Amino acid sequence: MKVEVDEDTCIGCGLCVEICPDVFEMGKDMKSHTKVKKVPDKLKAKVKEAAQSCPVQAIKVSD
Ligand code: F3S
């Protein structure tokens, strides 16, 4: 599973970083960035939860 944050869409609410800090981090630009391109199996559920929780649907997951 891959994950990307659309930085133009992200409003920096920080929910994804709170839910899954192993994958998302807040940049100096106050946008979320991914630390990994490929999501480890054990973090898939958290990443999906983060994607669903993002208020502006800035997180894209794909297989
Ligand atoms: Fe941005 Fe959505 Fe995360 S607004 S900080 S990608 S929860």
Image (spheres, rainbow, N blue to C red):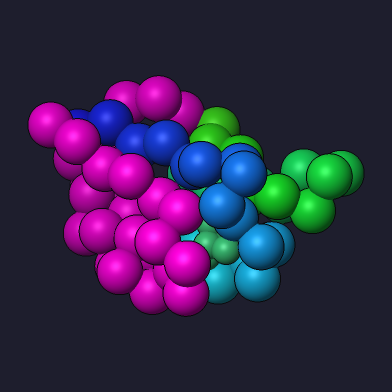
The answer to which of 59 and 38 lies nearer the viewer is 59
Q: Quadrant of the C terminus?
A: top left
Residue 55 appears in the picture as rendered: yes
Residue 46 appears in the picture as rendered: no
Give how far across and how far down residue 55 sits, in percent. 47, 74
Q: Is residue 54 left or right of residue 44?
A: right
Q: Quadrant of ligand 1?
A: bottom right
Q: Is residue 34 left or right of residue 53?
A: right
* Residues drawn in magenta: 36-63
Give how far across and how far down residue 46 sits, in percent. 31, 61
Q: Residue at x 62, y 44 (%)?
A: 8
Magenta residue check for 51: yes
Q: Quadrant of the N terminus?
A: top left
Give how far across and how far down residue 24 sits, in percent. 55, 48
Q: Residue at x 40, y 25 (%)?
A: 37
Residue found at the far front of this picture = 8
